[in-house]
Image (cartoon, rainbow, N blue to C red):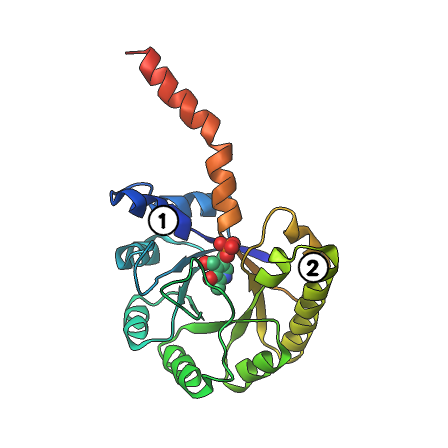
Amino acid sequence: MAKLAVNVDHIATLREARKINYPDPVTAAMAAETAGADGIVVHLREDRRHIQERDVRILRQMVQTKLILEMASTPEMLGIALNIKPNIITLVPEKRSELTTEGGLDIITHFNNIKESVKHIQNGGIKVSIFIDPNLDQIKHAHKMGADMIEIHTGAFCDALTEEMQEKEFARIVDAVKIASKLKLGVNAGHGLGYHSIKRFKGLSEIDEFSIGHSIVARATISGMEQAVRDMAALIKAL
Ligand code: PXP
């Protein structure tokens, strides 16, 4: 059965909008674990726009399932990660101007740099996943550089506007999953997955884990709205 890793970056996005100390992504991570999450994911970005180093350090102490740190393959991030020691590091591409991760890491172009990072991380006792597009050459290179697992970028499938495009993108994901599994790579998937698109993955049993953030945090804010208003209205009525 596939597992669910919950990304809590957006809780930190809300906190950083006010630059105060709530909502806290650590509290959200604890709630996610209580509800059955199999892992907690955070992306420590170079510009620290949401998750802060402090969050990752506290999560390392608090998370009871597994902590997955998404990060760029840079000397700064490698230093922080090897010190904090999450259970898994997912290497992702990163551009300052992007709203979110826009595509998989091109590990063919950056083969030597990424391979060196993979070895460095593994020597520190941490497993490495690489976020890549559902492209067979990229997957073969992930295997060649000794990654433990890959995370297949599902964004193009989730963003496809027509059924025809969706099916074309989903076929790419299926091919990618099958080849990765044949190469004995662990296979995860994520980006853009929501409460409808996840249903398409029924039967694709080679996927070990889905990494999902935006849709879960979005649903939490809406489904929690009534209770939040009720609580405040009750306090005002009691004034
Ligand atoms: N996987 C990776 C590598 C990501 O960068 C993200 C977004 O932070 C996700 C999964 C989760 O994507 P979403 O927030 O769209 O569910």
Image quarter of the N terminus: bottom right
In the image, residue 37 above or below residue 74: above
Q: Residue at x 43, y 88 (%)?
A: 112
**Circle nearer the N terminus (2, 1):** 1
Residue 59 on image: x %, y %: 34, 55
* Residue at the (43%, 81%) spot, across then down: 114
In this view of the protein, can residue 43 be seen by the observer? yes
Identify the element where label 1 is drawn: helix
**How much space separates mark 2 and mark 1, taking CA atoms?**
30 Å
Task: Give the residue type at disc 2.
Answer: Gln
Residue drawn 34% across the image and 63% down it: 45
Residue denoted by label 2: 166
Q: In the image, residue 2 lies at what x, y percent?
A: 62, 58
Q: Which residue type carries mark 1? A: Thr
Quarter of the figure with residue 67: bottom left
Residue assigned mark 1: 13
Q: Is residue 167 above or below residue 180?
A: above
Kindly tell me whether residue 212 is visible in this rendering. no
User: Taking 207 as reference, is 149 left or right?
Assistant: left
Q: Is residue 43 left or right of residue 4?
A: left
In the figure, is residue 153 to the left or right of 55?
right
Look at the picture and state if 92 lies above or below 15.
below
